[in-house]
Image (tube, helix red, strand yellow):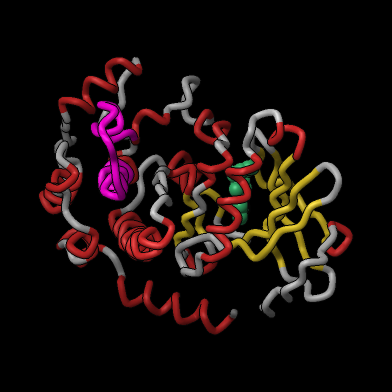
Amino acid sequence: EKKIPKSSSWTVEDFEIGNLLGRGRFGYVYCGREKQTRFVVALKILFKAQLKNSKMEQQVKREIEIQSNLKHPNILRLYGFFHDEQRIYLLLEYAPGGELYRRMQTEKVLRESEAAGYVYQLCNALNYLHTKRVIHRSIIVDIKPENILIGKYGILKLADFGWSAESTSTCKRTTLCGTLDYLPPEMLNGNGYDEKIDLWCLGVLTYEMIIGKPPFDSQTQHETIRMIRSIELTFPTGTSTDLRDLITKLLRRNPADRLPLKDVAQHVWITKNADIAAIEDSYVKRKKTL
Ligand SMILES: Cc1nn(C)cc1-c1nc2c(-c3cnn(Cc4ccccc4)c3)c(Cl)cnc2[nH]1
């Protein structure tokens, strides 16, 4: 694909609008194609009116500024944006594989090779963000299946819609917007938190991808909160010892005790199950197409 040309004077006329990919509280995401270069994008359309009366403009501006500076194969690119009277249009990278959460819904459980590949790529994305966070000191990314897309060649894309508080995608999971499943203890206790919450969320996601439900899943929010606080962690029989070891080392109450990112990427469950060479190769392949 050719690079999408930089232009601050985009208008919606420059794009052919394809099918609706998803909807959120503040807007919609369509598949779109820039007419000149035929470059395919995901066109996210936010309505100014809705942003206005929910005081989200500032947050959207800040997130656009941060996200347009993030350039990493495992982070969904924001190529640019433009606006008209009523709407803001974000030109986002199109991920042909769709949402990880939907894949988990249809597949119920993922094979260890696929899940380990995603965890390895998330470590790369988070490592990159942690260096960037040093600059922005505020990118708290919430890792959950709703914020992860699957790109070309099966490359994982952290899309972090969190800022647009697209609660609808989380609401897809349960009536009560089951976002509690990914909350770490320190956020429940109102203590301060830092990027080590990502390690907790990585543990919850890894568990859910392989076992098919989050570790502290229960009938009521109250019960989920109790299980998170007491870290009541049980594994179905047949869960590999390597996987139990990794998850137990991530779901630690004290953030300082959680396995650091570089040790996660080198953990035996990852090195034994993820095809790291293929992932590194897909980075190279992707770089060539840019
Ligand atoms: C869905 C879907 N199915 N297939 C085959 C591909 C996709 C796909 N979706 C995307 C999407 C995409 C879509 N919805 N969402 C969630 C959302 C919707 C509205 C506001 C905020 C967040 C993201 C993107 Cl950004 C970028 N690329 C995408 N690709």
Residue farthest along the bottom direction in this orientation: 288
Q: Quadrant of residue 255?
A: top left
Q: Is residue 211 above or below residue 281?
A: above
Q: Quadrant of residue 252?
A: top left
Apparent side of residue 51 relative to residue 136 in the rendered image (left or right): right
Quick one: 168 or 84, which is closer to the camera? 84
The quarter of the rendered structure image containing the N terminus is bottom right
Apparent side of residue 140 relative to residue 246 in the rendered image (left or right): right
Give residue 228's position: percent from left, percent from top.
Answer: 23, 28
Residue at left offset 20%, top offset 26%: 229
Apparent side of residue 19 relative to residue 58 in the rendered image (left or right): right
Residue at left offset 41%, top offset 44%: 142
Q: Is residue 50 magenta?
A: no
Give residue 18's position: percent from left, percent from top.
Answer: 78, 54
Q: Is residue 200 magenta?
A: yes
Residue at left offset 86%, top offset 45%: 85
Give residue 106's position: percent from left, percent from top.
Answer: 48, 41
- Say whether residue 137 is visible: yes
Q: Is residue 222 above or below residue 277?
A: above
Q: Is residue 279 above or below residue 23?
A: below
Q: Which residues are magenta?
A: 183-206
